[in-house]
Amino acid sequence: MAESDAPVQRWYGIDIGGTKIELVACDAGLTVHHRQRVATPTRDYAAFVETIGQLVDEADAALGVRASAVGIGLPGVRDRDSGVQLSANVPALSGRTVGHDLEARLQRPLALGNDLQCFALSEAHDGAAAGYPSMFGVILGTGAGGGYCLHGQLVAGNNGIAGEWGHWSLPATLQLRHDLPLLDCGCGLRGCLERYVSGSGLAMIHERHGGQARDATTVVELAQAGDPIALRALAIHRDLLGYSFASLILALDPHVIVLGGGLSKLEQLYRDLPAAIAPYLFNGVRVPPILPPVFGDAGGARGAALLARQLHGAP
């Protein structure tokens, strides 16, 4: 068969977040040929499975070709023996065998990964971390977590949870310093950093100190207008991030950190975070470059497509 007569191949990547689901259809070079976003049904499991099915069906119809495989970046963690999912940000998935049910609905090979790790994998391949020996991709949005790549390969860990820094505990020193409550987390633990450094965490800090903002965007807008409570909330949030990132550096020592998620769009983070991190590191430890993502919000979906291509690509 001549090269020009070779069948067209597409790999779909689906990024599932706490507020939106995004599908991208990529060719072998990861060029995106189709993209669609919809809201995430966070509490209706049947609606969730059908939403994924409709996205894939519509992509097949739009492209006129059936995808070779589908990569899915699932939020949370999956028990490797039972396949049961635990997801704090999409509660409908918890206790469900999501991979099995989606494979039955889509009727094609799946590559299941963690949504945060898919983001990191994408940025390690021709993204902001291209050329670095190691990288950590940090997601700051509805939740907080990330993924670690070494020499362009994802390091998932024994349980597949490498990079779940959002479920490290807030230290008592910072809780007392900033008068923060001890909050339960959807993962079943208490005091997880995710509850404080995510977008909703920033809004919580603002409310805790006398503000009324319901989301992170409003806090940022108020701070830009000079509101003292919002400015204080951002300063506390920045200090918590400084501690969190310093802990990542001490644990993994990545050559670069790439930010993703809604809060990654805050330009001041790239300017202010190095100074917030440094006090939590001992002398001689340097803060690595902290960079915005090349692929923006599409990084997780692109990484999921890359995962599908790697696991189910043509020889």
Image (cartoon, rainbow, N blue to C red):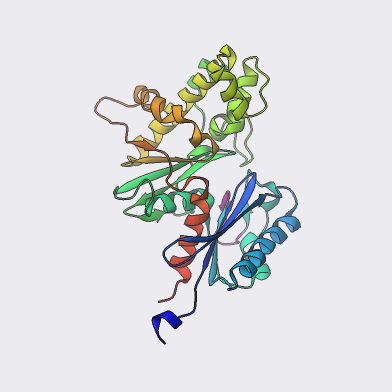
Q: Would you identify the image quadrant in which residue 288 lies?
A: top left
Residue 300, position as x, y percentages in the image: 51, 51
Q: Nearer the viewer, residue 74 or 27?
A: 27
Q: Name the residue: 68% across, 20% down.
A: 212
Residue 251, position as x, y percentages in the image: 36, 39
**Residue 80 within the segment the image draws in magenta:** yes
Q: Which residue is most to the bottom?
A: 1
Q: Nearer the viewer, residue 307 or 170?
A: 307
Q: Along the horizontal axis of the image, is 178 left or right of 53? A: left
Where's the N terminus, which quadrant? Answer: bottom left
Q: Classify 307 as above or below 140.
A: below
Residue stretch rendered in magenta on the structure: 75-83
Q: Classify 308 as above or below 140.
A: below
Q: Which residue is most to the left?
A: 284
**Residue 53 within the segment the image draws in magenta:** no
Q: Along the horizontal axis of the image, is 38 left or right of 115? A: right
Where's the C terminus, which quadrant? Answer: bottom left
Does the image show residue 5?
Answer: yes
Magenta residues, dominant SS class: loop
Does the image show residue 157?
Answer: no
Residue 254, position as x, y percentages in the image: 33, 42
